[in-house]
Amino acid sequence: MSTVMPEGESIRKAVKWVSDNLEEDPCRSVKKLVNEAIVRFDLSPVDSEFLIRLYCSKEKAQTASPD
């Protein structure tokens, strides 16, 4: 199942930035990275909500799956 990306360069850059940072250091706080991305890329409320939901669902899926 793929995630539908909203239109807009800012949200795409934000998703890439958060993903890159998590790849470099998986121990970083997802919530802090998402909040920083919202400010850094000046996301609209709709795009901010999308980013929060995207990473919250990924975080829940990772903690729910056995290693």
Image (cartoon, grey):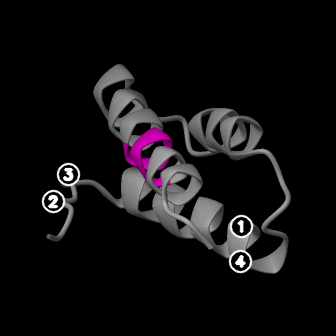
Circle 1: residue type: Leu
Q: Is residue 57 left or right of residue 30?
A: left
Quadrant in which the N terminus is drawn: bottom left
Q: Quadrant of residue 48?
A: top left
Dot label at residue 6 = 3
**Is the Cβ of the residue at disc 3 closer than 8 Å to that at disc 2?**
yes
Q: Which residue sits furthest top?
A: 45
Circle 4 or circle 3, nearest the eye: 4
**Is the Cβ of the residue at disc 1 closer than 8 Å to that at disc 4?**
yes
Instruction: Provide residue 26's location: percent of width, then percent of height.
Output: 78, 67
Quadrant in which the C terminus is drawn: bottom right
Q: Which residues are magenta?
A: 54-58
Vertical placement of residue 56 versus 27, above or below: above
Dot label at residue 22 = 1
Residue located beneath label 2 in the image: 4
The answer to which of marks 3 and 1 sits earlier in the sequence is: 3
Q: Who's the residue at 17% across and 70% down the image? A: 2
Circle 3: residue type: Pro
Q: Who's the residue at 50% across and 51% down the image? A: 64
Q: CA distance from mark 3 to mark 2?
A: 6 Å
Q: CA distance from mark 1 to mark 2?
A: 20 Å
Vertical placement of residue 9 versus 43, above or below: below
The answer to which of marks 1 and 2 sits earlier in the sequence is: 2
